[in-house]
Structures are given as structure tokens and as C-alpha cells.
Amino acid sequence: MQEIMSKVPPEDRTPYVIVAFQECERMNGLTSEIRRSLKELDLGLKVQQQTCASVLVSDCFKLMISRTGFCCIKTARKYCVYFAEKLR
């Protein structure tokens, strides 16, 4: 941004031009924050997917459900079949 500002001669830097540069700097900061947040979200979703996949593979869904407060007797595979039927 400084590089672009240096190309504008001081006599051409009207208040409107200065405000436009300030807004560009703010938007650059905002877009970099959005980019950082999206990377964190993507990483979190990948971890969540891996956790769900490992639960389905290891069939420890029953243990996870019992930790959350209610007991269940269905295994993860039975839940998958149940929900697949519900979606049809």
C-alpha cells in the first residue's frame, strides 16, 4: 500500500484520495483476517471429519453417546443404516 501511495504526488493527495487509501488498508486487514479465520475453520473441519471417520471405523459411537449423558445400545453402523433409511 505504501508503494502505491508513494506513486501519488503530494499535491494530488486530496482528502478523498487519503480516505480511499485508508479504506484500502482497512480492507486489506479485514481480508487477511477473514483468510486466517477460514484457514482455522478448514483445519477444524478436517479434524472433525477425521474424528467422525475414526468413530465409524472403530465403532466406539456407543461410548461417545454414553459420555454425553444418555445411554444407547445401537452401534455406529446401525445408526448409519438408520439415518440412511430416514433420508430415503
Image (cartoon, rainbow, N blue to C red):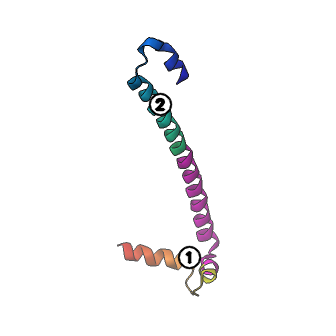
Q: Which residues are magenta?
A: 36-64
Assess disc 1: are there few (<14), some (14-19) or many (≥20) residues with their C-alpha within 10 Å of its C-alpha. some
In this view, the residue farthest toward the left is 88
- Say above or below: 33 vs 2: below
Query: Which-is-in-front pick, marks 1 and 2?
Result: 2
Q: Height in image: 22 above or below 85?
A: above
Please name the residue that numbered disc 2 is placed on: 22
For the point 43% across and 29% down, the residue is 19
User: Would you say the magenta stretch is mainly helix, strand or loop?
Assistant: helix
Q: Which residue is painted at 38% across and 25% down in the image?
A: 16
**Label ID, residue 9:** none
- Mark 1 to mark 2 CA distance (whole Å): 54 Å
| Within-10-Å neighbours for mark 2: few <14, some 14–19, many 20+ | few
Which of the two residues, 6 or 68, is positioned nearer the viewer here? Answer: 6
Q: Percent position (x, y) of residue 75?
A: 57, 80
Residue kind at label 2, given as amino acid type:
Gln
Q: Is residue 82 above or below residue 40?
A: below
Q: Earlier in the sequence, mark 1 or mark 2?
A: 2
Q: Is 38 in front, or is 28?
A: 28
For the point 61% across and 64% down, the residue is 51
Badge 1 is on which residue? 76
